[in-house]
Image (spheres, rainbow, N blue to C red):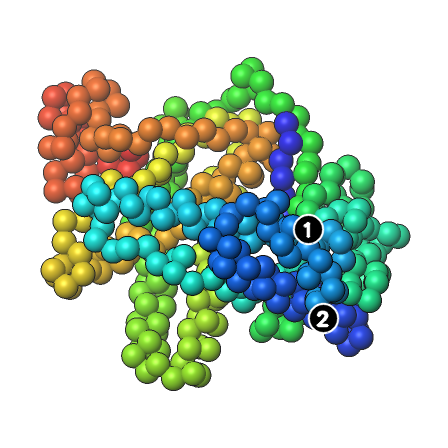
Amino acid sequence: MKQVLTAKLKLITNPDRANLLREVSLAYREALNYTSRIAFENKKTSSSSRLQKLVYRDLRSLYGLPAQMACNVPRQVAATYSGLWTKVLQNAEHLKLGITKKRFKGLDKAPKYSSRTCPLNYGRDYSFVKGKVSVITLQGRIKVEYQGYHKHLDLVLSGKATYGAAKIWYNKSTKTYYLLVSIEVEVPELNSTDIKRVMGVDVGRRYLAVVTDTKNQTQFFSGKSTVHKAGHYQRVRKRLQQKGTRSAKRRLKAIAGRERRFTADVNHCLAKQIVTPNTLIGLESLTNIRERTKPKNQGKKASKKQRKANRNQAKWAFAELHSFIDYKAIMSGSIAVKVDADYTSRSCPKCGHTHEDNRPGKGLVFHCMSCGFTLHADSVA
């Protein structure tokens, strides 16, 4: 079994090398925007081969991109247009069904790229040479020293990992360049005889995660502090949006990044505590969870209390938490599987009786109307 990880390597650059990295990343971004305009003018095409024939020579002559980068640009733009066309078709279907009244406007104008990221292919655009990373630029290759998480560095230096594509990424706040490297690690196959524990994980906002195993050992991970933090960010965001000045918009971007990093950090810590070796972990299938749990009243029709509940419900990144649990499980010799979560909080684990009255008022207490079994509702789920 193979597991893909992303190693974040900080590039130790001097002003000259930083300027070369800046030059290639900006040229790549301009090439993306140029190709996006060409695709829009040619019936919003999502064909990478057609786009490459239209723009390849221009990308080489106008922006000075190396050959491999000039091939990557039309592929990336074609993938963007393909995703937008998928949303257009979904929107048309939802309009027919009456799910929405809004028309998707993503293809009304050519998509614009603003991020200074530059994809690299291993062997062609970057490689590791004697403790340094060799990266291609518009002026040729440069060798740069790097730092990173010690476990990722060990994988890079050991030679046990297989390298995939990478990205040059620029952090505006620290004015630092990073290399995000895709690493494929070989992990031993997990046999059914190796499993020593079976557990289920229920996610929510009151408790970010509730873990219960077959021996009735239960862990509760409270979400009280995260709800408080999310409320703080929401209030600050509201004030800045009302202000609407340029400095307020800059502050909004900074706060969005801070909130995203806070969420990722909490999810990483949670996943690390949940995952144990040689364990089969059951996770809820959250596909279309927003539609399935959509509240009756939204927007102006909802009360102040309902709007707050809606905001809290949609605020946490549960899919991210699941992805962290999944890859950490594989790395620790465990496995995570998705389980249908429908009616799990209403079904009695003792007699199987399923009814909404088993959970009065959708509260924290589960009481079976058939056999009288009583337990915490999240533990039952």
Amino acid under disc 1: Cys
Q: What's the residue at 29%, 79% (across, down)? A: 242
In the displayed structure image, the side of residue 131 where residue 102 appears, left or right: left
Q: Could you say which disc has been placed on residue 71 in the image?
A: 1
Q: What's the residue at 62%, 54% (across, down)? A: 54
Residue 71 visible in this rendered orientation of the protein: yes
In the displayed structure image, the side of residue 326 where residue 319 appears, left or right: left
Nearer the camera: disc 1 or disc 2: 1
Return the disc, 1 or 2, that comes first in the chain's sequence: 2
Amino acid under disc 2: Glu
In the image, 200 versus 71, the foreground residue is 71
Secondary structure state at the residue bearing disc 1: helix
Number of labelled discs? 2
- Where residue 373 sits: x, y (%)? 18, 26
Q: Residues within 10 Å of mark 1 (few under 14, many from 20)?
A: many
In the image, 121 versus 4, the foreground residue is 121
Depicted 283 relative to depicted 96: above or below: above
In the image, 99 versus 259, the foreground residue is 99
